[in-house]
Image (spheres, rainbow, N blue to C red):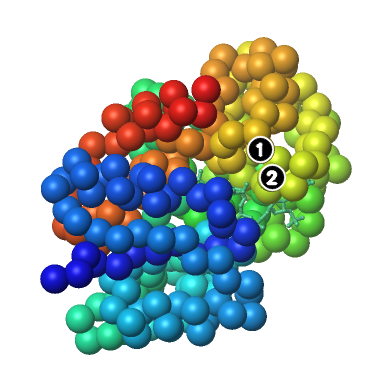
Amino acid sequence: MPAAQFAVFGHPVDHSLSPRIHQAFAQQCGIELSYRIIDAVPEDFASAVRGFFDEGGRGANVTLPHKAAAFALADEHSLAASRAGTANVLTCRADGQLAAHNTDGNGLVRDLTERHRVDLHSHHALLLGAGGAARGVAWHLLDAGVRTLTIINRSPAAAAALADAIGEPTRVHARYWDDLASIGSYDLIINATSAGILGAALQLPFSVLDSRALCYDLSYGAAANEFLGWARTAGARCAFDGLGMLVETAADAFALWHGQRPATEPVYQRLRRQAA
Ligand code: NDP
């Protein structure tokens, strides 16, 4: 019997770590699978996904810029996907219908709380960005217990829309990017912008950083260097990139598809060594 087919869709997507991560999980669990990269431009995304599943594909990861399109394509949506309005996992059900899920928020919280041993309960968090990834993590940070969440975005309407969608006005606030210098300090700063991968500088004032602050960039590799460098220069207690989140989100997708959650730490450590 041929190995079950999985894939990651994105554009550009050539450097995706997902094939390596899923093959490492599969080896660990004694599962045989095929996992490939499918580069699809936005106009071709829907037909490429349908073609993949029509030919027997079992599951797909979806990355930039297709996460909203993946959500729209699916027949049913998990709570996490519905809240975010985006999906990073598509699964073909036995009846041929597509189920959408979003594992970003769970992946971030697991990486923070289990790998980096952060107790989120006491934190006043500043979330930079209000795009797909920010929407994917915002509710999970609140569910994990952050005391307040301040969302700030270059285009203010998106930050206000996310705060409104969450609907907890005593805990969640939207602020203007232009107000950064006067909004006070935070002990958890999460960069969910794509500035790093776009090669743009965020130009954040040091005043947003509390002396005990922990900083986290959802990006990893070279894309995280600017924000993490800023955090260390500003005196952050810890500064983490999103490599651990990537591995945790992949493990959640793997669990959805194969019914078992692999151990993530060996895979994370191997990728970290290779990145070094
Ligand atoms: P989106 O395109 O949906 O959103 C991008 C966000 O970044 C928007 O809020 C945008 O603001 C903001 N932004 C872009 N450029 C700038 C800039 N120069 N200054 C300030 N803000 C800027 O992307 P995603 O939300 O999907 O992804 C964001 C990042 O998170 C990416 O780097 C992605 O790789 C990473 N990510 C990592 C994951 C992991 O597992 N580690 C998982 C998911 C995402 P505006 O609205 O004004 O345009």
Which mark, by number, is residue 21? none
Q: Quadrant of residue 68?
A: bottom right
Q: Is residue 266 above or below residue 45?
A: above
Kindly indicate whether the residue at mark 1 contacts the one at mark 2 (C-beta within 8 angstroms): yes
Residue at 49 percent across and 66 percent down: it is 38
Q: How far across and down, in percent of the image, does residue 202 sit? A: 78, 37
User: Residue flagged by tag 1: what amino acid is it?
Assistant: Ala
Disc tally is: 2
In the rendered view, tell whether residue 40 sits above or below residue 230.
Answer: below
Mark 1: C-beta under 8 Å from nearest atom of ligand 1? yes
For the point 65% across and 63% down, the residue is 161
Mark 2 lies on residue: 197
The x, y position of residue 210, in whole percent, is 65, 19
| Disc 2 residue crowd, few under 14, some 14–19, many 20+, Cα 10 Å | few
In primary-sequence order, the first of circles 2 and 1 is: 2
Q: Quadrant of residue 160?
A: bottom right
Residue position for label 1: 223
